[in-house]
C-alpha cells in the first residue's frame, strides 16, 4: 500500500486532523474488538497530538477504559525526569475524571531494573496484547515523530537496531541524548492498522524528501521501515513539505 502524504498549512491544523483521525480509528476498532491500542510519540508535534487527544477525551463518546496508550520509545531515565517522553501525558491524564485510558510506561532505571530488563518487561506487555488480538493488527494507530536524520522511535540511521527482531529493544548508544533508551522495533511498530508519521518544521524537509524516495534503504531512513496494514500516512506542515519558513 503506497505511503500517503498530507500537507497542512500549519502545525495546529495538522495536530487537529491527526487527533480527529485517531478518535475515528478508536471508534472503528471498538466496534469489533474489546480494546483499542494507540502508540504515542515524543517530540514537539507528537506531544502536541497526545495532549490534544487527552483534552478531547471528556467531550468524546468513547469508552476510554477500553483504550490503551503506549510509547513507541522512552528515554531510560527516572520516572520523575522531565527528559522522559511520557511526563506531560501522565500529568494531563491525572487531571481527567474516569473513565481514563490505561497508560503503559517503560520502567525506570533502578538497582533492580537494568536497561535490558526494562525493554524485556515492556516487550512482555506488548506481546500479551498482541496475543489477545491474534485475529487483527495489534495496534490501532502508531504515531511516530520523524527526526531530522530520519529516525523514528529510538531506531537511528545506520544502527543495527534497524534490523532488530526483538519486540522491544534496549538502546545503549543513542546518537541523540540521552544514550539509554527502550524502543519498539520497526517490526513491532508495523503490527498496526495505521502508521502515521508526523513532521513539522523546515528542519524535517530533507528527511521527508528521503522518506518519500523509493530507492532509499531503511538503514538510511528508518522511517521507511514502518508500514501500517490499512494506512501509512505522513502528516506534515508546509515548512516540512517545502523546506522554508
Ligand atoms: C526522543 C523523541 C524523538 C522525537 C523525534 C521528533 O525520544 O528523543 O521522542 O524521537 O520523537 O526526534 O521530534 P520533534 O517532533 O520534536 O522534532
Image: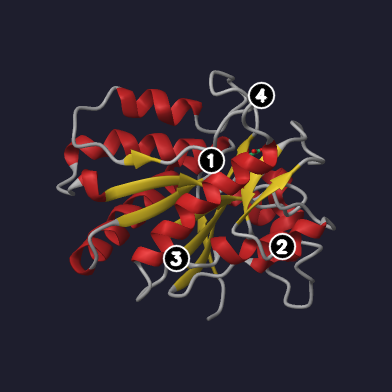
Q: Secondary structure at mark 1?
A: helix
Percent from the top left, x then y, of residue 199? 60, 50
- State the count of labels: 4
**Beta carbon of the mark 1 residue lies under 8 A of ligand 1:** yes
The answer to whether the residues at label 4 and label 1 have Cβ atoms under 8 Å apart is no
Would residue 81 appear left or right of 18 to someone viewing this image?
right
* Circle 1 residue: 45
Mark identifier at residue 194: 3
**Beta carbon of the mark 3 residue lies under 8 A of ligand 1:** no
Q: Secondary structure at mark 2?
A: loop
* Circle 2 residue: 164
**Beta carbon of the mark 2 residue lies under 8 A of ligand 1:** no
In this view, the residue farthest toward the bottom is 1
Marks 3, 1: nearer the viewer: 3
* Circle 4 residue: 111
Q: Quadrant of ligand 1?
A: top right
In this view, the residue farthest toward the left is 61
The answer to whether the residues at label 2 and label 4 have Cβ atoms under 8 Å apart is no
Marks 2, 4: nearer the viewer: 4
What residue appears at the point 46 percent right and 50 percent down from the top-left corner?
A: 125
What residue appears at the point 23 percent right and 44 percent down from the top-left corner?
A: 64
175 or 150: nearer the eye?
175
Cα distance in 3D space between marks 3 and 1: 18 Å
What residue appears at the point 36 percent right and 48 percent down from the top-left corner?
A: 19
Q: How is the protein colored in the picture?
A: secondary structure
Q: Residues within 10 Å of mark 2 (few under 14, many from 20)?
A: some
Q: Residues within 10 Å of mark 4 (few under 14, many from 20)?
A: few
First in sequence: mark 3 or mark 4?
A: 4
Amino acid at each position: 500500500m503506497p505511503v500517503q502524504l498530507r500537507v497542512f498549512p500549519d502545525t495546529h491544523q495538522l495536530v487537529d486532523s491527526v487527533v480527529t483521525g485517531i478518535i475515528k480509528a478508536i471508534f472503528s476498532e471498538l466496534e469489533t474488538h474489546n480494546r483499542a491500542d494507540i502508540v504515542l510519540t515524543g517530540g514537539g508535534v507528537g506531544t502536541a497530538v497526545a495532549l490534544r487527544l487527552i483534552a478531547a477525551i471528556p467531550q468524546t463518546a468513547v469508552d476510554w477504559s477500553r483504550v490503551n496508550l503506549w510509547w513507541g520509545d522512552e528515554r531510560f531515565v527516572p520516572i520523575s525526569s522531565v527528559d522522559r517522553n511520557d511526563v506531560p501525558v501522565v500529568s494531563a491524564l491525572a487531571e481527567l475524571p474516569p473513565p481514563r485510558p490505561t497508560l503503559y510506561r517503560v520502567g525506570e532505571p533502578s538497582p533492580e531494573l537494568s536497561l535490558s530488563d526494562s525493554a524485556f518487561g515492556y516487550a512482555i506487555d506488548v506481546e500479551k496484547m498482541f496475543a489477545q488480538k491474534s485475529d487483527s493488527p495489534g495496534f490501532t494507530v502508531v504515531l511516530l515523530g520523524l527526526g531530522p536524520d530520519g529516525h523514528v522511535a529510538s531506531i537511528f540511521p545506520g544502527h543495527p537496531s534497524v534490523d532488530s527482531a526483538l519486540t522491544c529493544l534496549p538502546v545503549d548508544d543513542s546518537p541523540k541524548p540521552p544514550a539509554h533508551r527502550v524502543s519498539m522495533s520497526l517490526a513491532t511498530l508495523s503490527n498496526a492498522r495505521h502508521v502515521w508519521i508526523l513532521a513539522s518544521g523546515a528542519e524535517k524537509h530533507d528527511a521527508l524528501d528521503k522518506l518519500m524516495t523509493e530507492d532509499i534503504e531503511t538503514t538510511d531512513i528508518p522511517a521507511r521501515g514502518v508500514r501500517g496494514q490499512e494506512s501509512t500516512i505522513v502528516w506534515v506542515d508546509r515548512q516540512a513539505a517545502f523546506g522554508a519558513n
